[in-house]
Image (spheres, rainbow, N blue to C red):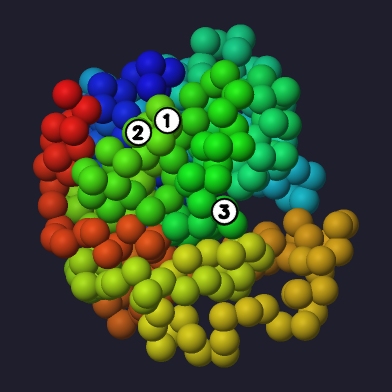
Amino acid sequence: MEDTGAIVPVICGPMYPGSNPELIAAVSEAGGIGIVQPVSLTSLYKHDFREGLRLIKKLTGKPFGVNFTIFGGANKKYHEQMQKWMEISIEEGVKFFLTSLGKPHEIVKIAKQHGIKVYHDVPNKKVALDMVDAGVDGLNCINWRGGGQTGSQSAEQFIEELRDVQIPLICAGGIGNAEDFQKALEMGYAGVQMGTRFLATKECIITNSYKQAIVDAKEEDIVWTNKVAGNNSSVIKTKDVMKGGLRTGPIITYMLRHRKLKKYARMYLMSKGLKNYSKTAFDDNVQFWQAGKGVGNIKSIETAADVIKEFAAVTV
């Protein structure tokens, strides 16, 4: 994972809630690489974007990255905001971008002009090959064991289908401990991305009940819902999650199936979901807990440094 600047091939994936500056800095300082989620940084934790980046740089001199979620032309205001975030990231010396959804061609072009590496989230082989053609530097392969917005195929299937791809592949999903990490490396992945494991750390600013729910949960406690973003998202089964069912109603379902309406439906769901997950970060009584199937191997709340240290031991 030379592209990221990480010593240990571990990415702390962008999360909402989660991804507070203290967590990002702690992961990078320990030898992995933390990724800024701009909406989480600014809307949830109330940092000015530039000042948030500068805070991370005060906490660590190690590299960190920034995530950009691409919605195309569905929201002009958001697109303009994303462009501004990217300009600030470049000015502040960020050298790693992780892009999600949409087409990252414009970001890739700008990044290459500034010596910045770009990895893109991919859910399957078709999108992966399209992203290779787009010039990305690596692929974040989101498998069906991931938390939050999840994939639809296994880590094993991903690596088998992309054997001929000549850029780094990251295993994103289901990594809960060093044994999971080692298995991913043995499969041929260049590194892993984790979210759930880093939510259950002392530096992450979410409720203690959320962290403890991750520790207490078993793999079978994870369910899929499309109410968060229009595609499947993995969450811990709670009364709040199950209220009203796991699937969208008929109108939103129709929009999600319509090529021209899909992006609007997803943005609506995401904006609604952000309100629920904002409360989740700070209110023990709100139990919308995103998590992946790696929960079964997460046994305690640790420091980010201890998590990275455990993983570093199996790379020696």
Q: What x and y, as percent, mark residue 111?
A: 59, 18
Whole-number angstrom distance, CA of label 3 to CA of label 1? 17 Å
Q: What x and y, as percent, mark residue 167?
A: 54, 21
Give, as a three-letter code, the residue at label 3. Gln
Location of residue 178 with respect to 130 vertically, above or below: below
Label 1, secondary structure: give it.
Answer: loop
At x 77% / y 51%, what residue is drawn?
A: 74
In primary-sequence order, the first of circles 2 and 3 is 3
Q: What x and y, as percent, mark residue 54?
A: 33, 29
Give, as a three-letter code, the residue at label 2. Leu
What is the number of the mark on residue 185? Answer: 2
What is the number of the mark on residue 43? Answer: none
At x 41% / y 88%, what residue is drawn?
A: 239
Which quadrant of the view contains residue 289?
Answer: bottom left
Whole-number angstrom distance, CA of label 2 to CA of label 3? 18 Å
At x 61% / y 10%, what residue is drawn?
A: 113
Mark 1 — residue? 188
Image quadrant for the N terminus?
top left
At x 45% / y 57%, what residue is drawn?
A: 145
Label 2, secondary structure: give it.
Answer: helix
Mark 3 — residue? 153
Q: Is residue 140 left or right of residue 308?
A: right
Residue 300 visible in this rendered orientation of the protein: yes
